[in-house]
Amino acid sequence: VFARLQQLGLEPAHVCSDAVFVRRVFLDVIGTLPTPDEARQFLQDKVPSKRTALIDRLLERDEFADYWAMKWSDLLRVKAEFPVNLWPNAAQAYHRWIRTAIRDNLSYDQFARELLTSNGSNFSVGQVNFYRAVQNKEPQTIARTVALTFMGARAEKWPVERLAGMGAFFAQLGYKSTGEWKEEIVFFDPNKVLPAGAPTAVFPDGTPAQLASGRDPRAVFADWLVDPKNPWFARAMANRVWSWLLGRGIVHEPDDFRPDNPPVNPELLAYLEQQFVAAHYDVKQLMRQILNSQTYQLSSLARSDRPEAEANFAFYAPRRLDAEVLIDALNEITGTTEKYSSAIPEPFTFVPDDQRSIALPDGSITSAFLETFGRPSRDTGLEAERNNRITATQRLTLLNSTQIQRKLEQGPKLQALLRAPRTRPRDLVDGLYLAILSRPPTDEELSTVANYVKLGGPDRRPMIDLAWALINSAEFLYRH
C-alpha cells in the first residue's frame, strides 16, 4: 500500500489514536461498541503491544461469531420467505450452521465445500439451504449464485456457453419432500435423466471436467474451486475480507471481478491471496494480519483531497454503522431493547427481549428501525444490497422520533448512569462520552457542556440533551 502511495505522490494519513482505534476495532471485528470500562482500560494501558492483544481477544469473543454470521447470512440469503419459503426452522438451521462454522473457525475451503456438496434435510442439515435460497432450481441459476458467492463474479455477464458449462455441475441435484410440512431433502441424484443436448461440465477457466460415473459432479467442482491454483477462490475472499475491514475492495465492488475491473493494487491482492493460501484458508488469521497492519490503523483524516487517496487506502474510509450495529449500540447505551416481528406466522419466530440485532437468525425477522436504516433484504447476495448511506428519514428518526426519545429518557442503564453519585461533576460527562463515543471529552467539549448546564445539579435533563447530541453526531453514527 505504501509503495503504491509513494508512486502516486500521496501522503498516507497518520496512525490513528488509541481512542479511535479501540472503537474502530470493536465495531469492525465484533459489531459492538466497547463498554466504558473496556474503553477506559484500553486507553490507560501502557503496554506497547496492547493493540495486537486486543485484536486477539476480540477474535475469540462470542460476538465475533454473531457479527460475521450476520454478514455471511446477507450473502447466503438466509431469510424464511425468500424465494421458495425456507420457513423459519430451515432458516434457523442454516444460520446455526453458519454461526457454528465461524465460531469454530472452519477453514474457508471446507466452509465452501460443505455448502456445495452437502446432502440431507433442509431442517437438520442447514448448509443444504444454499441450494434452496436461490431464485429457482435451474442449474444455471445455481451456477450464478456459486460464482457470485465464491468467485466474486457476476456470471450473468459471462458468455452463454461458459455459464452453461458451469451449470452442468449442478444438473443432477434432486429435491424430495417429506411428511413434514415444508421439509425438503436435497441430494445428489445419480439416476436423474438429463435432457437431450444438455451441456457438458466445463470449469469456468475453460477446462473440460472428467466426471466419473456415480460421483457427485458438485464434489468435482468443489475440488477445482478450492485448489490453491484457482484464479478466483482465495483471491475473491481475500479481497472481500479487505473490503469488510477497510470499507473498500482492492477490486471494487468486492463481488465484481472481471477483466475490465482490475485491482487498484495488484501486488497487494496477490500478497493477501498468497498469505491466505499459506495459512490454509484461515479467515481469522487473514483478518488478524490486516487488523495489525499500519494501513488498517491509519487515521480517517486524509492528508490529500485527491480522489486516488481513498481508492488506494491512504486513510481509513469512514462509513455509517450497519443498521443492526447501530440499534444494538443505542440499546446497549440506554439499557433498552428492540421489538422485532416476522411476516411468517410460523413456529420459532419468537424473539427474546434481550435479542441483539446482529444475532438475528432470519432475515424476515425485522423492525421498523432496521428497515429505515438500510438492512438488506437478502434477495440477491450482492454486497451492495446493504445501504449504509445516511438519509433524511434516518436523521429525522434519530433527531425527533418517539422511539429514540423514550430510549434516552426511560432507558434504565442511561438513567442509572445519570443518577449515580459522583465524586466530581465531570465524571457524569466522562461517563456519557465513554459510553457513546468510547473516549473522554476534550477540554473544549467540557467547556461547552459547562456553559450549557451546571454540572452536579439535581436536574438531569441537560445530560439527556447531551446524550441526544452525542448520538446524533457523525462521530457516533460512523465508524472512523
Image: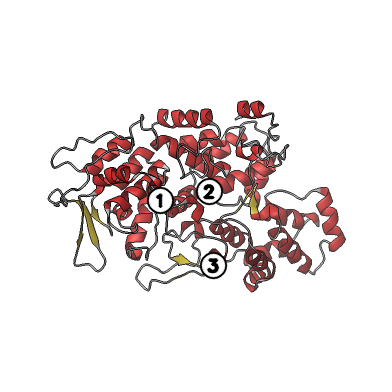
- Identify the element where label 3 is drawn: loop
Mark 2, Cα crowd under 10 Å, few <14 / some 14-19 / many 20+, is: many
Measured in 3D between alpha carbons, the distance from the residue under mark 3 to the one under mark 2, in whole angstroms, is: 19 Å
Camera-side residue: 141 or 364? 141
Mark 1, Cα crowd under 10 Å, few <14 / some 14-19 / many 20+, is: many
Query: What percent of the width, then of the height, locates residue 319?
Result: 62, 50
Quadrant in the picture for residue 431: bottom right
Query: What percent of the width, then of the height, locates residue 145?
Result: 36, 50
Q: Earlier in the sequence, mark 3 or mark 2?
A: 2
Residue placed under numbered mark 2 in the picture: 30
Residue ID at (53%, 37%):
250
Quadrant in the picture for residue 86: bottom left
Residue placed under numbered mark 1 in the picture: 99
- Say whether residue 22 is left or right of residue 430: left
- Identify the element where label 1 is drawn: helix
Measured in 3D between alpha carbons, the distance from the residue under mark 3 to the one under mark 1, in whole angstroms, is: 22 Å
Camera-side residue: 309 or 140? 140
310 relative to 187, above or below: above
Residue ID at (33%, 40%):
110
Q: What's the amino acid at mark 3?
A: Glu
Q: Is residue 467 visible?
A: yes
47 relative to 351, above or below: above
- Identify the element where label 2 is drawn: helix
Which of the image's four quarters has the N terminus? top right
Residue ID at (40%, 50%):
99
Q: Earlier in the sequence, mark 2 or mark 1?
A: 2
Q: What's the amino acid at mark 1?
A: Arg
Residue ID at (33%, 65%):
85
- Say whether residue 339 is left or right of residue 207: right
Residue placed under numbered mark 3 in the picture: 338
Mark 3, Cα crowd under 10 Å, few <14 / some 14-19 / many 20+, is: many
